[in-house]
Amino acid sequence: MPFFRSVVFQRTAVAAAFTLLAVNTSYAQTPAPAALPDPAATSVDALGWMKGFPPPPDKQITFDNPAGGVFPRTRWSFSHVRETVPTANVWRGSGAASPLPSAPRDDIEAVTFKPLGSAGSEETVTFAQMIPRTYTDGILVMHRGRVVYEKYFGALTPERPHIAMSVTKSFVGTLAAILADEGKLDPSAPVTKYLPELKDTAYGDATVRQVMDMTIGVHYSENYADPKAEIWDYARAGGMLTQGPNYTGPKSFYEFLVTLKKEGAHDTAFAYKTVNAEVLAWILRRASNQSLADLLSEKIWRRIGAEQDAYFMVDRIGTESGGGGLNTVLRDLARFGETLRNGGRAPNGQQAIAKAVVEDIQRGGDPAKFAKAGYALLPGWSYRNMWWVSNNPHGAYMARGIHGQSIYVDPKAEMVIVRYAAHPVAANGGNDPLTLPAFQAVAEALIARP
């Protein structure tokens, strides 16, 4: 087998997980809690994935076995992406890491809440119970600039990167807002100002702002149950699914994006589609004349004092996945969230991101356009610069990714929560009923007991 064909074939092992970087946030397919696998029985330690030198054949997660990308093996593979697919490095810089002072609290786990949708139910859940029930790999809570809670489970450790899934999009949206603030990107400009290649596509009459806020009318489905959905074409083009010896379709993200056709009007409704993030990432490369990895390193990663390099998954020509391919350690995810909470000032004291950029994110988008998307568990929310904005009394906003990846910033509570996870249900509807009230309850507890 030629070398390149071998590499593409090997990537099949994580296909089922990593093709879904996009985050289908539909709630329709969410199973009842009773249908979910037992968290303890499906842990990495309980099942022994990749233990031993070499691991027993039935415990190996190998490139040539597609089951490697399916739960429960994802509880190992989400923390070992670089060992399975090609990546591009995001340099942390040569400076010292930003301090993350520790002030552990023993009352976080005892915080209680009622799950969303439990009207009439007497069920009360603790923060400690939420953690295994959302298949958490690592979780960290910061309050007033100090780490008050931090725990890791399964294959994740403090120094090991984990895939961020669609939390990646919020980094891409923040980079776009940064370039706009610097005058290097015009959100009101047509997409074709930067990408003339898209003039005959859905984006031919769209603006950059419409891409940033995902109000694009584009024919693209992320319905996992439909084998003909465009998500699979996107995945094959990006090398996340094997293209096969007779494949004649697009062979890179760029080649796929130029095939997208318009469906409906722009700027009338929020419609969450990963291809918008990939288009925005392409715009950023053109506007900055840098790769996405280099741009993230220069504008954010070095400035916030990250302690570890990050990395992106890439396609066959080295193009980073702006839709969901970023991998970071949990503590650096917390540094990013804390930087935003502090109006762009990083834990090292540097004004890493302009305050105007953060304020633009916090302002949110149009709730009326967001409401048309039908997110029953997110009433009153909006979307701005690829961030999910709650518009609640605390002004909380989130970066969200499938299987439970989260950055949750609560300005009023002076709190940031970051989590990496491997929930068996991709859609956020699988964990939101526990996650959203748990994070809110911790915020309220920290306000009440500072």
Image (tube, grey):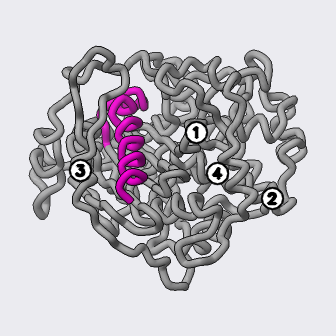
Looking at the rendered structure, the secondary structure element under dot 1 is: strand
Q: Which residue is located at x 87 percent, y 60 percent?
A: 183
Q: Is residue 74 magenta?
A: no
> Closer to the observer: label 1 or label 4?
1
Measured in 3D between alpha carbons, the distance from the residue under mark 3 to the one under mark 2, in whole angstroms, is 40 Å
Measured in 3D between alpha carbons, the distance from the residue under mark 4 to the one under mark 3, in whole angstroms, is 33 Å
> Closer to the observer: label 1 or label 3?
3
Mark 3 residue crowding within 10 angstroms, few (<14) / some (14–19) / many (20+): some
Q: Position of residue 55 (x, y in %)?
A: 13, 56
Specify the segment rendered in magenta: 422-450
> Does residue 13 appear to the left or right of 197 in the view shown?
left
> Closer to the observer: label 3 or label 2?
3
Q: Nearer the viewer, residue 271 or 377?
A: 377
Q: Are marks 1 and 3 in contact (CB under 8 Å)?
A: no
> Closer to the observer: label 4 or label 2?
2
Q: Position of residue 156 (x, y in %)?
A: 28, 58
Q: Which residue is located at x 62 percent, y 21 percent?
A: 371
State the residue position of label 3. 109
> Closer to the observer: label 4 or label 3?
3
Residue ranking furthest to the bottom: 95
Looking at the rendered structure, the secondary structure element under dot 4 is: helix
Mark 2 residue crowding within 10 angstroms, few (<14) / some (14–19) / many (20+): some
State the residue position of label 4. 172
Q: Is residue 237 shown to the viewer in this render?
A: no
Q: Nearer the viewer, residue 42 or 374?
A: 374
Q: Which residue is located at x 59 percent, y 39 percent?
A: 389
Q: Nearer the viewer, residue 172 or 381?
A: 381
> Does residue 86 appear to the left or right of 391 in the view shown?
left
Q: Of callouts 4 and 2, which one flags the residue occurring earlier in the amino acid sequence? A: 4
Type of the residue with mark 1 = Trp
State the residue position of label 2. 181
